[in-house]
Image: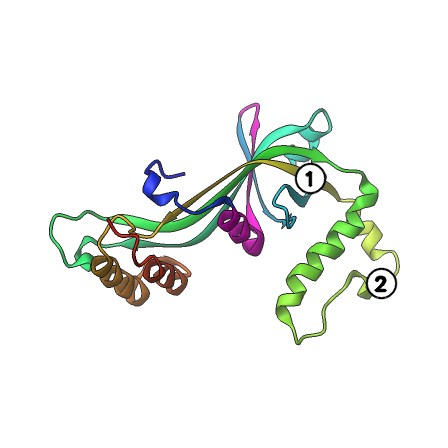
Amino acid sequence: MHPNPVFHTHENAANLEYARERAFGVLAVSGAEGPWLSHIPFLLDEDGETVWLHLLRSNPISRALKEADLPARIAVSGPDSYVSPDWYGVIDQVPTWNYVAVHLTGMLALRPQDELHNLLDRQTAFFEERLLPKAPWTTSKMSDGVMDRMMRAIVPCRMKVTGVDGTWKLNQNKPDDVRERAADHVEAYGQGTDIAVLAALMRAANGQGQ
């Protein structure tokens, strides 16, 4: 997380909603020789207190969870882009990178294997709903026995959320007109991901300039 408090003005509810809708992040757990990282889709409950996910049985995190629950963090990345000093239209600026990121911290635990099918059905329904009016894909479309065989390779997990933090680095520390000029250039020339979304968020930060 960025250390400047001006970029941490969003309430927990906004950070949780962003993580819930993004539903994909990097799971980090401390291993014996350094961090273990896994890129995962997940479900965040409406109350923001529980994350549901699944991992390959062969994942080092899965193997470690057999011994004990583990402290973990999920980093959820949003739009981002390089920002050139020239885009502000004022002197004595430096390059930077604007971005949105939310971190969820908590205790990660294995769950009983008989919870896996329901978890996969809920995850699938969450993402398939976004594809309407396409008829949703469901696990019932799998041939007899195939789903059961595939599920043997993965395990269900749950993380109880104990901490939430979010960075919304959108040039809030600039006057509104300066930030809006930068947003226009981000949309036209940005280098990163979802630059149009980032530009819109920068413009929506109107009134927060200092």
Q: What element carries label 1?
A: strand
| Residue depicted at x 63% and y 46% | 47
Residue type at mark 1 is: Arg
Q: Which of 176 and 128 is in front in this view?
A: 176
Q: Which residue is identified by label 1?
A: 158
Q: Residue at x 54, y 24 (%)?
A: 33
Mark 1 and mark 2: Cα distance apart in space:
28 Å
Give the x, y percent position of residue 91.
11, 52
Instruction: Rate crowding at label 1 as few (under 14), some (14 to 19) or many (20 or more) other CA atoms within 10 Å.
Output: many
Residue 36 position, x and y percent, is 56, 33
Region rendered in magenta: 13-33
Residue located 81% across and 66% down the image: 141
Compared to residue 70, the image places residue 200 above or below, namely below
Q: Which residue is drawn at 70% across and 40% down?
A: 157
Find residue 9 and report its horizontal and vertical position in percent: 39, 45
Instruction: Inspect the image, locate mark 2, and give the three-letter code of the amino acid beneath it.
Output: Ser
